[in-house]
Amino acid sequence: MISFNYEIDFALENEDLYSEWIESVVESEGKTLGEINYIFCNDEYLHQINMQYLNHDTLTDIISFDYTEGDIISGDIFLSIERVKDNAKDFEVPFSEELKRVMAHGVLHYCGYKDKSEADEQLMRAKEEEKIVMFHVKH
């Protein structure tokens, strides 16, 4: 099950499309969907989580808490819409594409992909691109 929670004045235009897409992302990795909660928030909200739980005094676009057990993918994914908008501008991509990238990024971590080394980051970026395309193909 996928749920969307809004801590700011923002809402996905069609939650069902995003739910179907995320489920297909999970299935495309040979995993089973458990429970994924997306929490859309602002920089301040996410910064507080970063400080409280991770001891990081930095802004970030995403923080994910992984509750995956075996092949059942579950977790809480916090997204700063402010960061996503800024990143979209910096990377010169549409907001909707950057949002999908970050949404997929959290799920890919749950599927076992890392992004700490350069090689891992390259694989993560390729997987993000692959999953973004799935949104367009499916819908």
Image: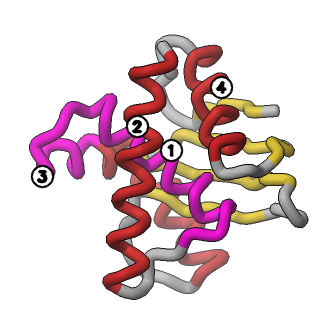
Compared to 47, does 78 lie above or below? Answer: above
* Lateral position of residue 127 relative to residue 17, left or right: left
**Which SS type dominates the magenta stretch?**
helix
Disc 3 packing (10 Å; few <14; some 14–19; many ≥20): few
Q: Earlier in the sequence, mark 4 or mark 2?
A: 4
- Residue at the disc numbered 2: 132
Quadrant in which residue 85 is drawn: top left
Q: Earlier in the sequence, mark 4 or mark 1?
A: 4
Q: Earlier in the sequence, mark 3 or mark 1?
A: 3
- Residue at the disc numbered 4: 19
Q: Of 46 and 26, which appears nearest the observer?
A: 26
Could you say whether the residue bearing mark 3 is in a helix, strand or loop?
helix
Q: Of 58 and 101, which appears nearest the observer?
A: 101
Q: Earlier in the sequence, mark 3 or mark 2?
A: 3
Compared to 9, does 118 lie above or below? Answer: below
Q: Earlier in the sequence, mark 1 or mark 2?
A: 1
Mark 4 to mark 2: distance in Å? 13 Å
Region rendered in magenta:
85-113
Marks 4 and 3 close (CB-CB < 8 Å): no
- Residue at the disc numbered 3: 90
Q: Amino acid at mark 3?
A: Asp
In which quadrant of the rendered image does the N terminus lie? top right
- Residue at the disc numbered 1: 103
Q: Earlier in the sequence, mark 4 or mark 3?
A: 4
Q: Amino acid at mark 4?
A: Ser
